[in-house]
Structures are given as C-alpha cells and as structure tokens.
Image (spheres, grey):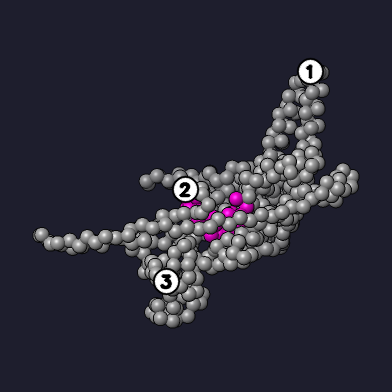
Amino acid sequence: MANINPNAAYQQILSMALEDRQPKYQDLVSNNNALLALTKRKGYWETYSGPRIRQTLQIAKQTAQWYSGYDQLINAALDLFNDCYYDPKMVVVPIILSYQEILNNRGDNQLIPVLKAYMEAAEKSLQDTFDAGLYSDGTANGGKQMTGLGAAVPIVNTSGTYAGIDRGSATIWRTQTFDAQSAFTTIGTQVNSTTIRPFLNAIMTKQSRGRDYADVLARHEKRQQYITPMLELQRQVLAELMTRRRQLVDMRVAEHNRLEHAGKHSARSIGSVIKLLDKQLGAIDAHIDDHMDRHFKTQRDLLDSVKGVGPVTILTLTAALPELGRLRRRQIAKLVGVAPLANDSGTRQGQRRAWGGRSQVRAIVYMAAIVAIRHNRAIKVFYERLVAAGKPKKVAIVACMRKLLTILNAMLRDQRAWDASRHLNVSVVA
C-alpha cells in the first residue's frame, strides 16, 4: 500500500476500504451469476499452485468382458489418465482518486462519499467483466480474457485446442450436440416453450449411464418450491445493517433500564452512553434509508402504502423475508409461522395452532398487525368480525397477522400498491 500514494491519510483511507470489502469480492462475483454460484456450491472451486492450472482427467476406461471357464481375457495397454491445463487469467479495476478529491468531498462540502462511490463502481465493473468473460472464448484483449464457455462448448466441436488438448485427435474431448430436427422426433422438431423441457429431459436421460451423469440439471418445473433463493449482495448488506440496528436498540433499552436504578454519578455515564447509541442509531438509519433507496425503492414504496406497515417492518420484510411476493399465501404464512398447523396423532385430533417459522419476522408482523387493527380499516373490520364471532382475541390477532402478510405478499407479487376497496368487502373464514 505504501507505493500507491505518499500521502499517509490517503493510504489509511484506502487500506480501510479494501480491508472492509476484500472478503466480499468473491461472493460479489459468484453470487450474482447462477453458473458460478452452482459450481461453487458443488465444491468445484479449487486453489492452484504453479504457473498453470492443471487437472487430471480420466480419458479412457477399461472394457468389461463376459467370460466362462478358461477364456483368454484381453488386457491391452491403455492410457487411462492424462492432464489438461489452463493458463490463469487476471483482472483488475484500477481506481484513480486524488487526495484533493477526498478533501473536496468531506465535512460540510461533502456531496457524496467519494471513496465509497468509487469502490462500488469498481465492484460493478468487476462483476460485469466476469459475467462477460464467463461466456467468452477467451480471445479478447489479445488472449488475456478469461477462457469461458465459448471455448469449452464451441459451435464446431471437431477441431481446435482447449485446455491443451486437441479435439481433432481426442474424441472424448468433443462436446456433443443434438439437432432438434432429428434427435427426438417423437417430442418434436422445433425448440419452443412446449418442447424445451422434454428435450432437456431426453438429453439428460441419453447422457446418463450408471454413475456417469451430468452435474447440472438446468431447470425443473417446480425447482422454486424446493430451493431457497440465494441472497443477493445488496440484501446481504441490508441484513447486516438490520442486525446491527437491532443490537444498538437492545443496548439502548438495557441502558435505559439501568438508568431507572442508577445513582447520580452512574446516571451521568449512562446518559453519555445513551447519547452515543442514539447517534449511532441515527447514522445506521440514514445508511439503511440510502441503501434501500438505491436498491429496494420499489418494494419499499409498495409496502409503505399500507397503514400499519412502518419503516422497521419494511426493513425486516425486505432483509429477512426475500421470499415475500414469490410464494403462495399458505406457503408464506407457514414460512413466517402464522399458519395454523395440525396437532393430530392417530385418532386424536388436537387443536390447531401456529408455531415455527422465522421468529424475527413474526415479531415484527405482530407489531404491524396491532397497529393495523387500530388504523387500517380493512384489518380493523376483519378483527372485529372475528371477535364478534366468538374467536379469542389472540386467535383474532394471529389471523390479522396472516391476512396482513397475505396482502403484502400479493402486493409484491402483482406490483400493486395498497387498495382498501379490494379488502373491505371480502368475507373471510378464520
């Protein structure tokens, strides 16, 4: 770092920024690209040493032979293994930032956090460059570009060299292609929305033999029901800010509790700590507002249109419930823990009750429902109807939580703001 700039203050600022962001570079790239994320999760990312990346391949296999009695077995010499190799490629995003620029953007004159803005722009450039390189043939920039899928899966599969192996002489190194017009005529002869899934299934079945099968099944019609979506980087950052905010709130509550029984000298110290915590909360709230404006503005505006849903509820639903708007109403209710679940055993039929789910989200939805019962006419009418029907108040509150969550889920799914007229005249059975 000492050679970047002789100004010590500049070195310290840049060093701190890199120290804070460096562990996230790899996740920034891999988590924003489906193929990289999948290969990483399957454990295909490996470190290497030496000038080249080498990988041992099984390029042939012995032939199993049926025999009886004293048959002579054929045991010819066989080259079973060989190595392929890849040249490592390097990518960098240079950042040019003078100390004068930092001075002009600090204190009362600050327009933007200039160093943070430069780093975010560099990260975006790095991500875009990786995305482009992953699908390239590695010939751009004089061959300095990453050798991507364009070279691994070429259009002409009988010539060319990949990973040091000539496809012309090594038939095992050739990728296989399927012509839709002739490969599976019972399915169809054209690739469209109707035939693409049967085509993929037929290809996967044809290529699978025993333990030899494809590592990736590209799509499954119900995959979203079984795979929790990965948190994108922006939502991970928001979750970190939410966690830190909750920690500060807990510390402030603890200090206020101590203040009630503190003596004169202790109260002064506790007051100073409370002021510091209030300042920290203000700063982190401003950071959260800025982050949500830049990355989740549409979702925040939709949720904010509902009476009873405040900033803390919006923050929690956005950071801790990314499935909101993506699941059906019963699924989202069960995920949060407000769905009535059976308590049966054999012939016994127990009382249904809500349990499990994400307690942090459920606690916030509870507070939102309490406020909505007072100020949101649709939820208030629903609550009063249940109480009038003889439902216990706690049961009615949980039902209001479930109804409010269902409404928010539908709003994000349809990208429609709150409309009270849609929920006032709907008869609901608890």
Q: Position of residue 370 (x, y in %)?
A: 69, 45
As for residue 29 lying within the magenta part, the answer is yes
Q: Magenta segment range?
A: 26-46
In the picture of the structure, the residue carrying the numbered disc 3 is 168
Main SS class of the magenta portion in the image? helix
Q: Which mark is residue 342?
A: 2
Task: Look at the image and tell me whether residue 35 can be seen.
Answer: yes
Q: How far is the residue under mark 1 from the one under mark 2?
A: 53 Å
Cβ atoms at labels 1 and 2 below 8 Å apart: no
Q: Earlier in the sequence, mark 1 or mark 2?
A: 1
- On the image, the x and y values in percent for residue 5 come to 78, 44
What residue lies at 37% left-to-right and 46% top-to-bottom?
A: 346
The residue indicated by pointer 1 is 263
Q: Is residue 388 visible?
A: no
Residue in the picture at 54% in, 63% down: 148
Of mark 2 and mark 3, the one earlier in the sequence is 3
The span from disc 2 to disc 3 (Cα, nearest Å) is 63 Å
Marks 1 and 3, how far apart at CA: 87 Å
Dot placed on the residue nearer the N-terminal end, 1 or 3: 3
